[in-house]
Image (tube, helix red, strand yellow):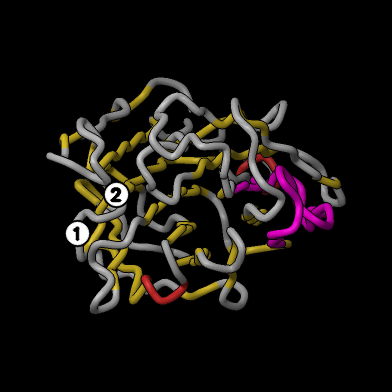
Amino acid sequence: MTALLLAACSQQHDAASIAATTGVPDFVAGATAYTPAKPAAQGASPAVMRHVSVAAHAFAANSAETDLPVLTTPPLTAPQGALVLVQTLTQSPATLQAIRDNKGNVYRRIGPVQTYSDQHAGTFLFVSENTKGGAAQTWSLVKAEGHAADEASLYVVVLNGARGIGAWGFSNTAPYGLRTPLTTTAAKSVVVSFWGPADYSGSARDPLNPYVAPPGWTLGGQNDNGYNQCSGAYAWIGGGAAGTVLDPQWSSKKSVKANGSMWLVEARP
């Protein structure tokens, strides 16, 4: 990951009024893609030629009371044959109807329905392997009928060189981390952390409550805990040996309750 192919971009629109608060953006988003790694030299060993790396990432979020039936990321250029992880945070588990992209890829859910924030909010994790990529690729969270105005967030991480999912875990019991550490199953894999805090610090309208990735992890993107967006963040780490134990701890400018959510998922070569 060297130069940026597509610089981070964002959109913000001011809502006239949300809960009597002016200047609240109804939609925020960002997308970043990286130049592809140079191919390995001919004659290199398979271990050298095959490793996992993050090729692109994107997010989108809408504030509560925003009439937005479909939440869509900005477009970016994604490689062919990549593995794509998609995580959602929604006002309730019933908010989410479907995950889709504009390339016709199929996404399967990892694990059961998960809840956090006193079991009121929902979070789901999806994966698609060997995907169709290309220019102007976008991902969308389709809301169920009657839930168009629900707050929601959508996070996407595109990985090169990954054949499938290795270890994964979820917790909604620890304020900043996972209940049980994750142990990687392969060398040269990448582990992605998706964090969804439950923040009751009175900062629901404060856009300056950033989330800090665990030490050694690369922060991909986030929507600060502002504007009632089911906000969250994502980060990744890679390059370790098989059997590496990971127990990442996020931090936040302001306090969070102990019932936030964290996904950890390994993309392995």
Q: What stretch is highlighted in magenta?
A: 169-194
- Image quadrant containing the C terminus: bottom right
Up/down of 155 relative to 34, above or below: below
Relative to 14, is 222 on the left or the right?
right
Q: Name the residue under label 1.
A: 68
Q: Looking at the image, which is closer to me, 5 or 22?
A: 22
- Earlier along the polypeptide chain: callout 2 or callout 1? 2
Q: Mark 2 points at which residue?
A: 62
In 3D space, how far apart are the residues under numbered discs 2 and 1 (Cα atoms)?
Answer: 8 Å
Q: Looking at the image, which is closer to me, 16 or 8?
A: 16
Residue 52 x/y as whole percent: 59, 45
Q: Residue at x 19, y 59 (%)?
A: 68
Give the amino acid type for the residue marked by disc 2 in the picture: Asn
Q: Which residue is drawn at 81% across and 56% down?
A: 179
Residue 163's image quarter? Answer: bottom right
Up/down of 213 relative to 55, above or below: above
Give the amino acid type for the residue marked by disc 1 in the picture: Leu
Would you say the magenta stretch is mainly helix, strand or loop?
Answer: loop
Residue 24's image quarter? Answer: top left
Up/down of 249 relative to 120, above or below: above
Q: Residue at x 28, y 69 (%)?
A: 142
